[in-house]
Amino acid sequence: GAGVSQSPSNKVTEKGKDVELRCDPISGHTALYWYRQSLGQGLEFLIYFQGNSAPDKSGLPSDRFSAERTGGSVSTLTIQRTQQEDSAVYLCASSFSPGTGVSFLGEAFFGQGTRLTVV
Amino acid sequence: TQLLEQSPQFLSIQEGENLTVYCNSSSVFSSLQWYRQEPGEGPVLLVTVVTGGEVKKLKRLTFQFGDARKDSSLHITAAQPGDTGLYLCAGDRYGNKLVFGAGTILRVKS
């Protein structure tokens, strides 16, 4: 597709279960970001990928959260032993990032998010 | 601590009023982007400012990049209910990753 695709769009899970959230970025976009957004709030940074590596994972809230990116494309955010406070919309964005020192980055394109509800 | 601080966090105003949203940092950015997010959607780019002191206008929206490229502002004239949403600034540090502010939630009441 032409845009960033996230799946599932909605996920309801029981407390304690593991969940996987998927992000398909725009083809050719080397940078990929995961953000979390609670209801009526702003963005909370989780992790940033450049290619398959994650130079900044400082926003992951606990060791229950992990993410990987394969083939410089699809990324998966995994939350283990989900808790009710994990309920939020998880947004993925991608952009073209030519590398450090180059003038400026292009636009970040966001998916529509995965709404996670932990019951 | 956010690298980019946005203020205010929340803003509720009446239709027709003017408002300004600020995006501040102690770091220099090569460019700064403003995004708007409507309920149920992902954020969408409004504008990119690149040159220190640059001013860009988009209808009733005026964006300014500080001379030192450390701060930016978004001014909305005669706000309308359709302007309601989350406004985000994002800074680019010379080809490195984009850094987003936490956002300003704007509600315009009719």
Image: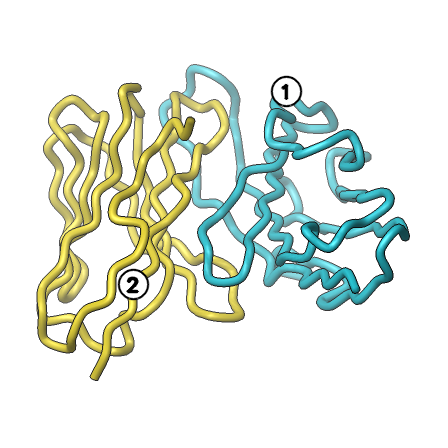
Residue A36, disc:
none
Instruction: Using the image, name the chain to which the residue with label 1 belongs.
Output: A
Residue at horizontal 48%, vertical 45%?
A108
Task: Name the quadrant containing residue B65.
Answer: top left
Can you say whether B105 is above or below A76 in the image? below
Query: Which residue is the site of mark 2?
Result: B106
Task: Name the quadrant containing residue A45.
Answer: top right
- Residue B19 location (% of width, % of height): 13, 59
Residue that protrudes farthest toward the right in the picture: A17
Q: Residues within 10 Å of mark 1 (few under 14, many from 20)?
A: few
Q: Secondary structure at mark 1?
A: strand
Q: How is the image coloured?
A: by chain
Taking depth in this image into account, of B6 and A96 the one nearest to the observer is B6
Count of picture labels: 2
Q: Secondary structure at mark 2?
A: strand
- Among the chains pictured, the one given cyan colouring is A
Residue at horizontal 64%, vertical 40%?
A28
Instruction: Using the image, name the chain to which the residue with label 2 belongs.
Output: B
Query: Which residue is the site of mark 1?
Result: A55
Asked if marks 2 and 1 fall on the same chain, the answer is: no
Q: Amino acid at mark 2?
A: Leu
The colour with which the image depicts chain B is: yellow
